[in-house]
Amino acid sequence: MGAQPYRRKTDNALATLLCISLNLIFVFCSLLKIARLSTAVDAVLSDSMSQEFEIKSSGVSVGMALTILFAFVVMLLLTAYDVVAAAPALCLKAAC
């Protein structure tokens, strides 16, 4: 990890994870745009060039959805970890 601007390690890990997820989504969107462009000029390309530039949109969409799902699950796990870690401190303040 590079910079760690937050006090808690979980906040730094979440920020890094979300940054990586956003970059992956950008890559997937770029691949979808290239796939759209290659279908638009498919009539001009030869068969070998058409096969070389063919990108399965369904695979890219599944990868994008899995990236978002993974980031969401990790975010929930880190949030649950913070809540469980903070529970004893909250209990002491409230005199449980």
Image (spheres, rainbow, N blue to C red):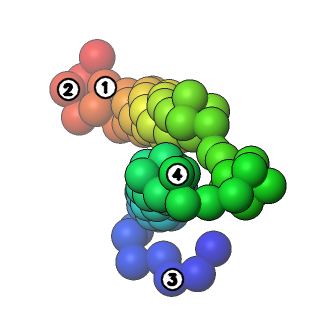
Residue occupying the point 42% across, 52% down? 40
Describe the element under mark 1 as helix, strand or loop: helix
Q: Mark 3: which amino acid?
A: Ala
State the residue lying farthest toward the left: 94
Residue occupying the point 48% across, 77% down? 4
Q: Mark 4: which amino acid?
A: Ala
Place residue 70 in its image quadrant: top right
Q: Mark 1: which amino acid?
A: Cys
Instruction: Please state, as top left, top right, bottom left or bottom right, where the N terminus lies in the image.
Output: bottom right
Describe the element under mark 4 as helix, strand or loop: loop
Say whether disc 1 or disc 3 marks the residue closer to the N-terminus. Answer: 3
Q: Are marks 2 and 1 in contact (CB under 8 Å)?
A: yes
Q: CA distance from mark 4 to mark 1?
A: 69 Å
State the residue lying farthest toward the top: 96
Q: Position of residue 37 (x, y in %)?
A: 44, 57
- What's the mark number on residue 94? 2
Q: CA distance from mark 3 to mark 2?
A: 35 Å
Q: Which residue is mark 1?
A: 91
The vertical placement of 10 against 60, above or below, is below
Q: CA distance from mark 1 to mark 3?
A: 33 Å
Residue placed most toward the observer, 10 or 63 = 63
Place residue 88 in its image quadrant: top left
Q: Which residue is mark 4?
A: 43
